[in-house]
Amino acid sequence: MESIWQLINEWEIQLLVLLSFIIQVFLFFTGSLRRCSTNGLLRGTIWIAYLGADVVAIYALGFLSRQEDAIMENGTLRRTHPLAFFWAPFLLIHLGGQDTITSFAIEDNNLWLRHLLNLVVEVTLALYVFWKSTIWHDVQILVPGIFVFVSGIIKYGERTMALRYGNLYNSRSAGNSFFNEKTPQMGLDDGYYGFICFALLWASGIRMLFARRMTEDIGNQFERPARMNALFFFDEYATNTLDHSQLVKLLDVELGIIMYDDLYTKAPLLRKRSGIILRCISQIDMGQPTLFLLSSKVFGLPETRLLWSGTMGQYSLLSYIGFNEQVNLSQRVMSMMRKMAGAFGIREAKKLFWVSKLLDTKSEVVDDKITEFLVEEIRHFTHGGQRQWPHLAPFLKKTVTLTTDFVTTISLLHLITEVHLSEVSASTAGGIGEESAALANVCQKLSDYMFYLVVAHPASASLLLVAAGSPESAIEKVRENFLAVVSSSKDDTLRAASVEIRKLVELPLAESYEDTLQELKNMWVRLLIYAAGKSRPEAHAAQLAKGGELITFVWLLMAHYKLGDCGSERIDLTQARGNDPDIPSRALRAFNL
């Protein structure tokens, strides 16, 4: 045992440097995966590596600073590894981090002054380690050591400046005039690369939107208003000319390549002349990211590259009370926990609410149908169009206008959607048409997504301004009033809920399902648009590091059309909620009831 510990002691510094290198390699390959994944295990692993990278490198530097005593006692370090002190500048390079991840969360960007202090301390410590060693007397080692030190200091400085530029409210981050001057002028006819160039030119404007700037005020922040007016004109032309698939791709580029990279990588530094010069000085072989940003036409950006997760969370009231398809391990575990809770006398589902949110939440792909309906409805809003609700008007008036809690409203509408879809399925034994089936699928996805946002989403309190009520209280209120009788069958439970709901409000008949499905789809799309218009821009920026949300996509699309609270036309739920004299903007209504 003593020989093992002696071996570990002799090789400790080598193991520390190797571990630091392995962590950096891991972050290099996985740092950018967060933009297109909502996997909690992946994010947790990256978080541990992100924190551990600094800890290991700093500890290794401290260990090196104490190696002189070991050399004086037995000469082991000098005899076996004469270049051990040469690792100090390489550890500075490790502390500089990878280009793919400079901050794990958006709050890290606010700590750039702390990182600046760490930069001064760690550089001083590394210089001390290098100075106290005996190898600096050798010119053959001193010269490359100086170059590596310069590279390490620059790389660590790059990380600190990237954190500073990543701060949403840093006014200097908006100025990318040099980069705008060098960006190729490309139009709609250039296809995907035209979208990239337009998004790069719009980078400052997009950033201001995420920093709570109004769309009307963005043009006043630029030194060249004529150029900004041209961009505004092109933006208006693009939003009204591009089809929905092209518009979706443009938004993907703005969210994934512009905003994510600006906030969580070293991209904003590489869009400045000083950053490009420092990068070329520090590492010529690392110059590819700069060229990649300056000339995407040469290196190419794969059009099929995932720029966000492309998924939407799903959570349902039926899962909350114990009905699910048990399609995966977590849902089977949840079912077993409910049975165990019942065996121990824990009958209230509220006691298992937090576990249900964790295990019953799933994801569905955001398909073209959903994005097409969203683009169509937002364009309908811009023309002041209102929807008629011949089948849904009775219960919409009850739920939307009479309930003051948005969480309760969504919970009740979600239950009504579940009931109606179940009745349609039961009344059409021969099956429904392909178009109606697609509409029913969209209604189900949007209903589960809105319920997920206001009830199950852990960050909904900071994301949605309208979701101010308690999710537990709202969901319990709906369950007690309409789902008091829960049978072993999902269909029987929904039939019992239908009876209770019809005591208060008239529901649409299942026979008119084709028109009703269209109205249900429009209803959920409008509710999502309303919620997006009332959301917090900085919370959307934080969500980009977690794979992104569909509501962020909707919010940015609305900003292009100058809709929502950040635009010139805000959207209220109904006429009754749109009488705020402090807001001068003209308000549209999601539901004209």
Image (cartoon, helix red, strand yellow):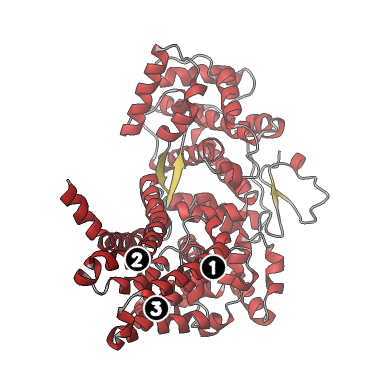
Q: Which mark is residue 154?
A: none
Q: Quadrant of residue 101?
A: bottom left
Residue assigned mark 1: 116
Q: Position of residue 574 (x, y in %)?
A: 71, 41
Tell me, yes or no, whether the two marked residues, 1 and 2, touch with CB atoms within 8 Å. Answer: no
Q: Secondary structure at mark 3?
A: helix
Type of the residue with mark 1: Leu
User: Which residue is disc 3 drawn over?
Assistant: 149
**SS at mark 2 in the image:** helix
The kind of residue on which mark 3 rests is Phe
Residue 204 shows up from this direction: yes
- Mark 1: secondary structure: helix
Asked whether the residues under the numbered discs 3 and 2 touch, taking CB atoms below 8 Å apart as contact, a structural biologist would say no
- Please name whichever residue, 441 or 452, is drawn nearer the observer in this view of the structure: 452
How far apart in space, not on screen, are marks 3 and 1 (Cα)? 17 Å
Q: To which residue does mark 2 refer? A: 64
Q: Of the residues under marks 1 and 2, which one precedes in the sequence?
A: 2
Sooner in the amino-acid sequence: mark 3 or mark 1: 1
> Which residue is at a point 16% across and 51% down the rendered structure image?
3
Q: Please give left or right for residue 227 compared with residue 371 in the image.
A: right
Name the residue: 37% across, 74% down.
Answer: 132
Q: Mark 1: few, some, or many residues within 10 Å (few <14, many ≥20)? A: some
Could you tell me if residue 238 is visible in this image?
no
Question: 149 or 526, which is in the foreground?
Answer: 149
Distance of mark 3 from mark 2, alpha carbons? 16 Å
Residue at the outermost front position: 73
Q: Are marks 3 and 1 in contact (CB under 8 Å)?
A: no
